[in-house]
Image (spheres, rainbow, N blue to C red):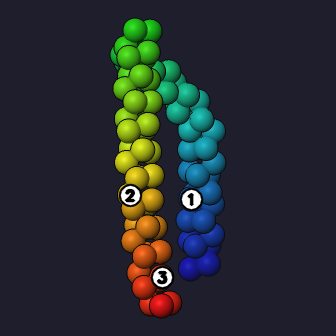
Amino acid sequence: MAKKAELDSKATKSKASAKKKGGIKKYLKDLKSEIKKVVWPSKKQVINNTGVVLTVMVIVGLFLGGVDAGLGAIIKAVLNGFAK
C-alpha cells in the first residue's frame, strides 16, 4: 500500500515537473502566435481615440465637479439652516 502511494506521488511530481519545463516554452510560442493575429490600430486611429478619451474625461470631470459643488452648496445651506 505504501509503495503504491509512493509511486503515485513520484508519478505526480514527474508529470508536474515535465509540465513546468515545457510550459514556459509553450506559453511563449503560443503568445507569439497570438500576437501575430492582433490587428494593430493605425497612428491616425490612435490619435483620434486618444482625443475622444481626453474629451470625454474633461466633460465627465466638469460634470462631476458641478455635481460636487451643487451638493456641497445644498449641504452647507441645510447645515446653516439648522445652526440658526
Residue 7, quarter of picture: bottom right
Rounded to the nearest whole Å, what is the CA distance between mark 2 and mark 3?
20 Å
Residue 68: quadrant of the picture: bottom left
Q: Tag 1: residue type?
A: Thr
Q: Which residue is mark 3?
A: 80
Q: Position of residue 47 (x, y in %)?
A: 44, 15
Tell which circle, 1 or 3, labels the residue nearer the N-terminal end: 1
The foreground one among 28 and 54 is 54
Which amino acid does the dot numbered 2 rest on? Val
Q: Secondary structure at mark 3?
A: helix
In the rendered image, the quadrant that contains the N terminus is bottom right
**Residue positioned 44% across, 37% down in the render:** 58
Q: Position of residue 4 (x, y in %)?
A: 56, 71
Residue 71, placed above or below residue 67: below
Residue ID for mark 2: 67
Instruction: Name the secondary structure under disc 2.
Output: helix
Q: Are marks 1 and 3 in contact (CB under 8 Å)?
A: no
- Which residue is painted at 55% across and 28% down in the image? 28
Q: Which residue is mark 1?
A: 12
Label 2 vs 1, first from the N-terminus? 1
In this view of the protein, which residue sits in the foreground, 79 or 48?
A: 79
